Amino acid sequence: MSYHVVIIGAGLIGRLLALELHLAGASVALLDRDSKEGKHSCAYTGAGMLAPYAELEISEPIIAALGIESLSLWPQILKKLPQPVFFQEEGTLVLAHPQDQAELIRFKSSVQFRLENGGWQKLAIARSDTNVMFDCNQPSIIALEAELPRIFTNGIYLPNEGQIDNKQLLEALRTAIEQANIPWHTDIDIASVSNRGVECKHLRHHSKNVVAELKSYDFIIDCRGLGSKKDIAQLRGVRGELLLVEAPDVRLKRPIRLMHPRHPIYIVPRENNRFIIGATTIESEDMRPLTVQSALELLSAACTVHPGFAEASILESRVNCRPAMPNNLPAIILPEYTGSPKIIGVNGLYRHGFLIAPKIANLVLAYIMNKPIDDYAQSIFHKGDPVLAISH
Amino acid sequence: MWQLAGKSLNSRLLCGTALFPSPQIMRQSIIASRAEVVTVSLRRQTPSKNGGSSFWDFIKSLNVHVLPNTAGCRTSKEAITVAQMARELFNTNWIKLEVTGDDYTLQPDPFALVDAAKALITDGFEVFPYTTSDLIVAQKLVDVGCKIVMPWAAPIGSGQGIIDPRALQTLRTRLPNTTLIVDAGIGKPSHATQVMEMGFDAVLLTSAIALTNDPENMARAFAGAIESGRLGFESGFMPERNMASPSTPTIGTPFWHKEAISK
């Protein structure tokens, strides 16, 4: 592929696309408002859960389909990276307190309903979808996670799920991109990408290079997340808050989701007794730091899952706003829609970034390279779909 | 057509906007429910403050009356402050007054509720107080000037249906001139039909629609159920009888059959 592709936005999808396009032979450049650490990207805040089946509780089957395919793509991606990234497939355990058993029943029936009625034949998922969800009694919960308190008498285990360390991945992608000598211009604030061209705010030290970069290109891929709000009117932010703690007294092997009628949380283990406790979901684009209310909700719920969290140290709190379309599904916005023959938007990954990014990157590559697109994924390609047109 | 706080409405269903899988499904479901009043939470869906404008745009696009709530408030003072903020932000004097007395069941605190209702009515609000099915609390709310009272059928989000039908029936009988809206606890369309058959003016619900596998169809189901219950109530039910009374003539029935029954 001899294209020159400019990728705007170096979050998770921007970095993945840069690497994959480079490996496919394209000449690639990255532009981003952030530093290479990527602190402002949603991926920096994400927990990195790869839970296609558990997400069926509130997501449409297409998310699960993209997630199942992505789960098998991650190991191939990780092989291309110069640094190790913590990745495991130990499944997910879903729990509820005795007084909230109805939440567990609702979770199961919701997942079951979408597994049975999701039009999976159309989704053409090769992987077997039997044995994806098991009821657990107390002994089987303890067999999975020995330290959990005995109050958890019922649970649901989803074995075919995984997790990835978000920060290690961003770092490893950064090194791979640097080693590939892909030009990466940081601190470039792009205000707008549209058929009127690319508008930059305060071009600083890189201005000459950036102007050269934008002089000739075959494609611009706009991956700015919520930064694209000016160009994609339907995009909104959904605030999420989480905490990183170090808990020497806690040993959990796999992500745990605690169902609760108001404050559902997850606890995701990292290496070295570190855990991510998240995440709130608030319909707001407020970027202020973690609120006391949310911290209380997250931490008190975590302590009921494992009393050892009471002695944990809080290392970090992270807040960001997930970019979402009105249907909460990802959108690959095609030139026919953006109004420019060269601009492709990739956005709306919402709370599913790590879950679906590998497959989304593949789909964008397939589109650029004129390769066939899976039937089931056609609906996320937008040429001017009225689904996106919410009239104000 | 009926009147709710000075507005003429066709639908007797009031719908919440939280808990839906996506704003798009929320929008489609509310359209399917034919609801003309939707509740919004000030705390988490504030239009200009806290950057909730995108979600607010979806709600505005529905062209319905907005009923802001004070969900999450635990004291009357807090609820009054939130109500005043809501009036400015949403440009309405309607307020769904919630003062939580118990964090787990979200059972309302009746004492703080009456206090807050009194203050807000003096301040010019149209107060929609969320309360239990207790008659005296409802009466006190009416005494301080509430024209609308919203008793629960069961604790909020529980979907248990009518846990105390006698209490609800008593409310309806004792407060014939108050607009009574059953708020919270409805799980199935039949629950909504039941309360509408009792003569309640309307039903407010969210979870029973939003937390189902197919919210849009469930919204349609509730629209039908509420309309059925109301039509039934307005038509007047036949009295219950403690014996069978066939609606087809028995003249042709052989007499020995009748005797067999009388034995």
Image: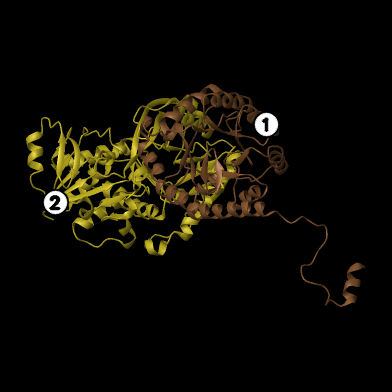
Image quadrant holding the N terminus of chain A, namely bottom left
Horizontal side, residue A98 vs residue A237: left or right: right
Task: Using the image, name the chain to which the residue with label 1 belongs.
Answer: B
Q: Nearer the viewer, residue A181 or A383?
A: A383
Report which quarter residue A371 is drawn in.
bottom left
Which residue: 66% across, 44% down? B162
Crowding near pointer 2: few (<14 within 10 Å), some, many (20+)? some
Which residue, as the protein is rendered here, is positioned at the far right? B263
Image quadrant holding the C terminus of chain A, namely top left
Report which quarter residue A275 is drawn in.
top left
Which residue: 30% across, 55% down? A385
Q: Nearer the viewer, residue A31 or A258?
A: A31
B225 up-or-down from B156: above or below: below
Q: Nearer the viewer, residue A178 or B135?
A: B135
Task: Using the image, name the chain to which the residue with label 2 belongs.
Answer: A
Q: Are marks 1 and 2 in contact (CB under 8 Å)?
A: no
In the image, the chain rendered in yellow is: A
Does dot 2 land on a helix, a strand or a loop?
loop
Horizontal side, residue A284 vs residue B5: left or right: left
Question: Residue A287, percent across and down?
Answer: 34, 30
Chain B colour is brown
Residue A26's disc is 2
Q: Which residue is mark 1?
A: B139
**Residue type marked 1:** Gln
Question: Residue A186, percent across and down?
Answer: 17, 34
